[in-house]
Image (spheres, rainbow, N blue to C red):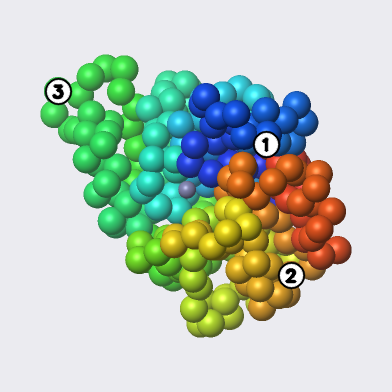
Amino acid sequence: MKITFLGTGTSQGIPIIGSDHPVCKSSNPKDKRLRVSVLIEWNGFHYVIDCGPDFRYQMLRSGCSKIDAILFTHEHSDHVLGLDDIRPFYFKQGDISIYAHKRVLKALKKRFDYIFSTKNKYPGAPSLHVNRIKNKSFKLNEDVVIPIKGLHATLQVFGYRFNDFAYLTDMKSVSDKEIEKLKGVKVLVVNALRIQPHHSHFNLEEALAFIEKVNPEKAYLTHISHLLGFHDEVEKSLPDNVFLAYDELEILI
Ligand SMILES: [Zn+2]
């Protein structure tokens, strides 16, 4: 399995438009973060988790030319706004499979009514193969994916486990029952927004405590705000098995 971090930034990305913050002004490429997303290459299939406003550029930058499914964590703009840009994949491959909770599907239908419409559909609009998922494992081609339910403040969000790899973003709390599903995972990705507490995201301290509970071999932090600090400085302060993800980082599992 190969994981490519397509984006590791929080909702506004880094740099923030017009910001004079030193992290936004940093010349280190690792301090430049597109909106959060990850590409998973697994048994010859290409899966993307979330499809935010930077999706088009992320696909160009990663050289990804085929998508077998998009899995959504939740419906916030930084995770869904790129859906229109699946068109090049749709034109080549036909309907694109998406997987999401029913509430997320409802939100997508409202925002992208022309994609979901069945009457007088605009000829250039893409079409989807919609898969509604619940909090139980489901088959993705021949493989099994386990959703992990968490809360983003009060909003239900899905993380996903693919064998030895698990990806969770926009979490503020995860119950012990859900943490059980992560036991034995080798590589865990989890959100860590900033140093200060936040009402709907783990801060660094909460993310590290969560990693300790799950106890993976390695963990990577994502959905990072400029307020977490410079990549190279934060990285140095982390435990030996925890790393800051950065855009275009690739890992093999
Ligand atoms: Zn987000």
Residue 10 picture location, percent across and down = 54, 44
Q: Quadrant of residue 8?
A: top right
Q: Quadrant of the C terminus?
A: bottom right
At mark 3, the secondary structure is loop
Q: Nearer the viewer, mark 3 or mark 2?
A: 2
Label 2 to label 1, Cα distance in Å?
29 Å
For label 3, the residue is 120
At mark 2, the secondary structure is loop
For label 2, the residue is 216
Badge 1 density bin: few <14, some 14–19, many ≥20, Cα 10 Å = many
The residue type indicated by label 1 comes to Val
At mark 1, the secondary structure is helix
Q: In this image, 3 relative to 77: left or right?
A: right
Q: Nearer the viewer, mark 2 or mark 1?
A: 1
For label 1, the residue is 23
Residue 213 picture location, percent across and down = 66, 78
Residue 115 picture location, percent across and down = 28, 31
| 243 shown above or below 98 | below
The residue type indicated by label 2 comes to Pro
